[in-house]
Image (tube, rainbow, N blue to C red):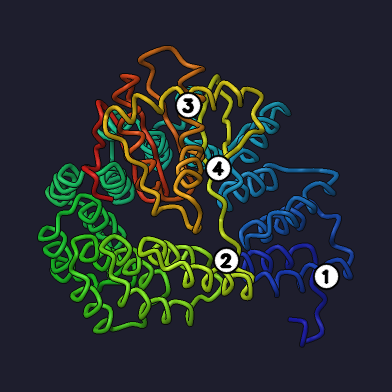
């Protein structure tokens, strides 16, 4: 168009920006932004709404917000783009705040906004807020929308209420493959592998054809529950449905084989794949090496991972874990220095807990909370009864060559323990405590929380980055398999 001498106008720019958003091409999107400013189109509400949408979908929430704040008139599209952009990029609290602002202004939210806030509630583990939004969905008539009904179900599952999610699933009419797949994934995330298998079989009987995402969900469910033979069977069944396995499907199989201790078979599967493996797939096998203490294979895999993704701190930390478990402190230090040279900073662990409709965040050794003294006192009071029940700190999870006593203290104040202690002092005896953690729960905290659930006679539900753990009477629903 431009090569032929035509000047783009306020009607052409939104389509160009929409294309940039669809391609997630931020570089060209910024060029289009510069050009529309030169053409004097930067005051048009539709152009600005397209700009907000482009920046948000390209992951640049800051620039999306900057454009949004400069708009003199904001339509529903711009509000929706901002809300969904926050949700899709992990700004969950901001998603909820923006939705509240939208409602306060008297603007009626649309389907995309509702889906975004339900996603945010699930990510935060904010069940009380989620319940409010569920009632809002019913009140506004969105409940009949299968996609919204699926989002509500998924939200409850992510907040730890799997049975309620399943009840809503059973009540949903016109379930499509997305709805079935979401429920299968939820069961898998909660370690209910057999339940996920029943759902998959019922879906096929109902005449709903699975896709590769459905198979990713069922393979992941088998992996979390240690159902090796069942997982192999479903992987082979993909051919019968005319589905060519994609990278995600192979990743699930590698994870399944690795968790089952079949490291050589997992490595062979990767080597014989029809596509090039990515760092994430090799990372699944590296995680299995940590579980089974296979240092030789771990070093071999780490070399491949660092060639593919040298800046990801997670893989460096995982390799450090393996070295630390073997007390190879020189190698731990080498990995730490390697991270520094590459600018790969370790992701900080944190845990979230909702109380009185407010989500509280705790970091490791966090003393910023107004009730820190009570929180730390509660943990210290638990120390003696835990040891009486046989608790022995697993100090190999501390990645520093320090005295054992210092290691024990470092473990005692991990973020999930602080959040649980906060839950213990703020809620009535017998109340379920629900925690969301951004990283994988460490083995020592896993053992400690089992004992805390027994001592306090509480159900403690912890969602980490991989799955749910339901702790009750000194036992975890994962069966110590995660």
Marks 4 and 2: CB-CB under 8 Å? no
Residue at the disc numbered 1: 34
Residue at the disc numbered 3: 380
Residue at the disc numbered 2: 22
Does label 1 or label 2 sit earlier along the sequence? Answer: 2
> Which mark is on residue 403?
none
Position of residue 254 measured from the top left corner of the image (x, y, whole percent): 26, 68
Q: Nearer the viewer, mark 4 or mark 2?
A: 4
Residue occupying image coordinates x 51% and y 44%: 410
Does label 4 or label 1 sit earlier along the sequence? Answer: 1
- Quadrant containing the N terminus is bottom right
Give the CA distance from mark 4 to mark 1. 43 Å
Dot 3 falls on a residue whose secondary structure is: helix
Position of residue 241 measured from the top left corner of the image (x, y, whole percent): 17, 66
Residue occupying image coordinates x 47% and y 26%: 380
Near mark 4 (Cα within 10 A), the count class, few <14, some 14-19 or many ≥20, is: some
Residue occupying image coordinates x 82% and y 84%: 5
Residue at the outermost top position: 428
Q: Nearer the viewer, mark 4 or mark 3?
A: 3
Residue occupying image coordinates x 30% and y 67%: 289
> Which mark is on residue 364?
4
Position of residue 52 measured from the top left corner of the image (x, y, whole percent): 71, 55
Location of residue 148 by image quarter = top left
């Amino acid at each position: 168009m431009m090569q032929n001498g035509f000047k783009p106008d306020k009607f052409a720019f939104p389509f160009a920006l929409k294309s940039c958003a669809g391609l997630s091409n931020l570089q060209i999107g910024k060029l289009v932004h510069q050009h529309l400013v030169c053409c004097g189109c930067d005051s048009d509400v539709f152009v600005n709404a397209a700009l907000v949408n482009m920046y948000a979908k390209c992951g640049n929430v800051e620039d999306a917000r900057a454009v949004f704040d400069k708009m003199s008139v904001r339509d529903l599209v711009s509000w929706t783009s901002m809300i969904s952009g926050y949700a899709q990029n992990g700004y969950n609290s901001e998603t909820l705040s923006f939705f509240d602002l939208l409602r306060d202004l008297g603007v009626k939210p649309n389907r995309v906004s509702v889906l975004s806030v339900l996603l945010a509630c699930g990510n935060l583990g904010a069940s009380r807020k989620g319940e409010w939004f569920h009632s809002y969905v019913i009140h506004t008539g969105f409940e009949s929308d299968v996609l919204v009904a699926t989002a509500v179900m998924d939200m409850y599952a992510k907040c730890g209420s799997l049975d309620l999610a399943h009840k809503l699933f059973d009540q949903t009419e016109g379930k499509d493959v997305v709805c079935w797949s979401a429920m299968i994934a939820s069961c898998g995330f909660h370690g209910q592998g057999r339940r996920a298998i029943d759902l998959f079989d019922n879906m096929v009987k109902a005449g709903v054809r699975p896709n590769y995402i459905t198979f990713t969900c069922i393979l992941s469910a088998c992996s979390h529950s240690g159902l090796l033979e069942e997982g192999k069977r479903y992987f082979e069944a993909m051919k019968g449905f005319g589905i060519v396995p994609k990278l995600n499907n192979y990743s699930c199989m590698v994870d399944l084989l690795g968790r089952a201790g079949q490291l050589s078979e997992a490595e062979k599967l990767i080597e014989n794949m029809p596509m090039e493996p990515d760092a994430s797939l090799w990372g699944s096998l590296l995680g299995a090496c940590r579980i089974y203490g296979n240092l030789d294979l771990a070093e071999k895999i780490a070399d491949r991972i660092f060639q593919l993704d040298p800046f990801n701190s997670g893989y460096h930390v995982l390799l450090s874990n393996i070295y630390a478990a073997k007390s190879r402190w020189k190698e731990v230090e080498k990995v730490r220095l390697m991270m520094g040279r590459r600018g790969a900073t370790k992701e900080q662990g944190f845990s979230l807990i909702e109380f009185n409709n407010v989500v509280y965040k705790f970091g490791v050794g966090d003393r910023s909370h107004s009730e820190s003294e009570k929180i730390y006192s509660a943990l210290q009071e638990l120390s003696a009864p835990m040891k009486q029940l046989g608790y022995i700190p697993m100090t190999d999870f501390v990645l520093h060559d320090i005295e054992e006593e210092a290691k024990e203290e470092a473990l005692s104040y991990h973020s999930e323990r602080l959040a649980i202690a906060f839950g213990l002092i703020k809620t009535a005896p017998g109340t379920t405590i629900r925690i969301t953690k951004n990283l994988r729960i460490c083995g020592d905290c896993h053992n400690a929380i089992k004992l805390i659930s027994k001592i306090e006679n509480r159900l403690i539900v912890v969602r980490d980055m991989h799955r749910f753990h339901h702790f009750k009477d000194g036992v975890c629903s994962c069966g110590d398999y995660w």
